Structures are given as C-alpha cells and as structure tokens.
Image (cartoon, grey):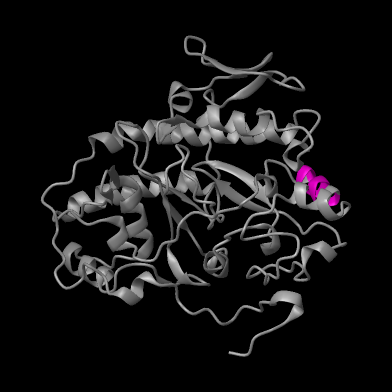
Amino acid sequence: MPMLDELMPWGTAPLRLGRPWVMAPDTASLKARWNALTGAEGVEQDALFGCTRARTPRSAVSQLPGQRTGTVRFVREDGPCPAPVRVTHGAFDQQWLIPDHRLIDTARPELWRVADDHQVFVVEHGWVAEASGPAVSVCAVLPDGRSPAGRPGRIRPLYRRPGGIEPNLAPGLLSALTGRYGHQVDADEVVAWIAAAARSTAAGCVVPLPADPDVWRSGVELGRRMTGIQLRGARGGERPRLPGGRRPYVRAAVPARPDAITYDADDEVLSLGEGRISPVPAEAWDFHVGGVRVLDLWFECRTAAAEPGTLEAIGPALWPQEWTSELLELITVLALLGELRSQQEEFKVGAELELPGVLPPPGWARRPASVLDHHEEGPEGQFALL
C-alpha cells in the first residue's frame, strides 16, 4: 500500500519555535511582548528571550523568505514589532506568529519560500494507537506542523515552487493516474483523494489507490468537500457555513476570564464559564485529532496560566471578541467535517492500484526545489551572490 511519504515525497519536520512566546492567539500580545523584550537589556533580556543553543539575542541570522524583518543582531534591535502573520497551529487552530528568524530556532525557510496564495499544505499527524481522528489535515496558511498529541508529524506542500508550479508528487504519478482513470488527473484531485483515503498506521500514513475509476471519483468528491471546509474560503472557495437553524450563536456572552469549557449533549450547548453557545452539534464537540479533543485544546491555548514574569504571561486582560468569532467558525468547521466522518469511515477502497516505475520516487524528489526569485537579506544586512 503506498505511503503518503511516497506520493508526496518532499516534506519537512514541524517548525521548532524554541520559545512559545513568539506565537499567540492575538496580535496585541505579540507586540506587547516584543516591546518588553526590546526594552530590556543584558541578563534581563536573555532571561525574557529564552536562550537556546540555536538562538540568543546575539545570534547572526538571515531573513525569513518573503518577510521584511531586521537582520541586525537582536541585542541591538530597537524598531517596532514586525507585522505578525497567520499560521495554523496543530490541526485546526489558527494563531499569529512573529515572522522574525532571529526569534525562531528552526523556521524551515524552504516552506516560507513556497507559501503563497496558490499553496496548500498537507499536515500529516503523528500516529497514536487506538486514537480517533483524521490522519491528515489540509490548510492554506503556513502550518507549524505540531501534532495535537505531541507526536512528530510532517508538513507536505502541494507545490514545490511558488505560483502553484511543479506539484510535490512522485514523478510520473499524474500521468499514471490519468491513464488508469480515463481523465486528466491534476494535483488538486490527488490532494482531495489523500484527504478522504489517508489512514494512520504505526509504520506511517498510508494512502491506498483504487484500481476502480468509480471508487476514485467518489473518493475525490468526498475529499473535495473535506478540503473545501478546511481551507475556509482560501483559493477562491466559500467560507464554511452550516445550514440555517443549525448555525451556532452566542446565547450568553463569554465572560472576561472563562475558567472552563463544558458541553451539554442534550441541549447542544457549549459553555465557556457563564458564556453559552448553541446549537453546537455533537460532531464538533467529539472531534478528536491524535486522541485529543480539538475544542478542549483550542480553549487551553487561550486560558492556560503562564509563569509570572515571562513573556508568555503577557496576554489579553479580557476575552477578546474576535476569539468568540473564531470559535464559532471552528465549531462550524468541525461540525461539517464530523458529518463527513461517517461517509469517510464507510468509504472503502477496492482492489489496489500498482504503479511500477513510479514508486518509490527518486531521491531528488524528496529535496526542496531551488527557489531563486526571493529577495532574502542575510545576517547584518548582507546578501549572497548565487
């Protein structure tokens, strides 16, 4: 049975931030943390920074591709915080990140070079024995690749170059599938199939390929619906919406500091402290990835206590209204995907298709392509001639 690692050969390990304070659910906290750090000096700045072997305030680091951040050693930085960028955290949470290479231990620059409006990222979640949930998720904004269960996963861009050029698929795969299924198979079809058919195993993520063209078509149709929901309106799609009468609304305002998240299955009510949201389908509440409930993890990321005196402790004093709006969208996404889970579980792949001469892919396909059209500043404002 083909592995996802064979069908999409180029992948990277998750981003390794090195310090949690560079990511947050809101932008105001990141800017306040930046100001606190640049306003400190010496030992105090080192303590706030969170020095590692890879990064200290005195590290010489190049720019992240596509970003216009400073490249002087951070110890001399006195400018404003770079504009935070949206990233996908874990499977379905969307947070903000300071896109400054001086603050991130391992940022995977090769991913930033190909992150644009044409790109789609497939995130392979780590295997957890007897855990429910999807084997992969799909997103349009750069993912950090962290598995909710804390297991190592992989990030696999759909395209190897900016502009939607050169699919990250085994050479010859599209031609072989086109010949077998009797129509022109493109990269988007393959990603839709992967979303519908991928399964986690102890050996890795497997993606069975059917010999029957009708099975392929039904799987692609299901996968397109799944990816459309997860892309949340990106790449020309529509934002996900539940049908009228099933859309969640705020029935009682979320308090300033909600202390717990609970669910009443009988009334379909999600409670955040004294706040009430309904109707919330059971499919949304029960949605797990890697054995972890997605809504529990989302709430924990916004309410968990941080160590006093650290930059992580700098956060909103009150529950921001935009968090409630993001929660309503997340509930919608999980509810719609949960409805499709039953179809996905019933979806069976018949006789498997063999692809001699296509799999395994050649070694060069596992390495990133050379992207030379980015203006990237090196440490201390230096540039390299290629």
Extreme residue in the top direction? 266
Residue drawn at 48 percent across, 24 percent down: 285
**What residue is shown at x 18% (from left), y 51% (from top)?**
214
> Does the stretch in magenta take in 103?
no
Relative to the observer, which residue lies in front, 17 or 248?
17
Question: Quick one: 121 or 127, which is closer to the camera?
Answer: 127
Is residue 340 something that shows in the picture?
Answer: yes
Q: Is residue 3 above or below residue 135?
A: below
Q: Residue 162's x, y, as percent? A: 52, 72
Toward the front, the furthest residue is 43
Task: Give the camera-side residue of 291 and 44.
Answer: 44
Predominant SS of the magenta segment: helix
Please name whichever residue, 322 or 88, is drawn nearer the observer in this view of the structure.
88
Query: Looking at the image, how many numbered discs can be counted on the residues?
Result: 0
Residue 279 placement: quadrant: top right
Report the residue at 50% width, 30% height from top.
243
**Residue 29 magenta:** yes
Q: Is residue 316 left or right of residue 289?
A: right
Q: Position of residue 268 (x, y in %)?
A: 51, 15
Q: Residue at x 76, y 78 (%)?
A: 381
Would you place residue 112 above or below residue 194 in this image?
below
x and y percent of residue 2 in the render? Answer: 22, 57
For the N terminus, the image quarter is: bottom left
| 127 lies left or right of 165 | left
Specify the quadrant that holds the C terminus: bottom right
Most extreme residue toward the bottom is 385
> What residue span does the magenta drawing correspond to?
28-35
| Quadrant of residue 13 within the rendered picture | bottom left
Give residue 111's position: percent from left, percent from top. 53, 65
Instruction: Evaluate whether residue 37 shows in this view.
Output: no
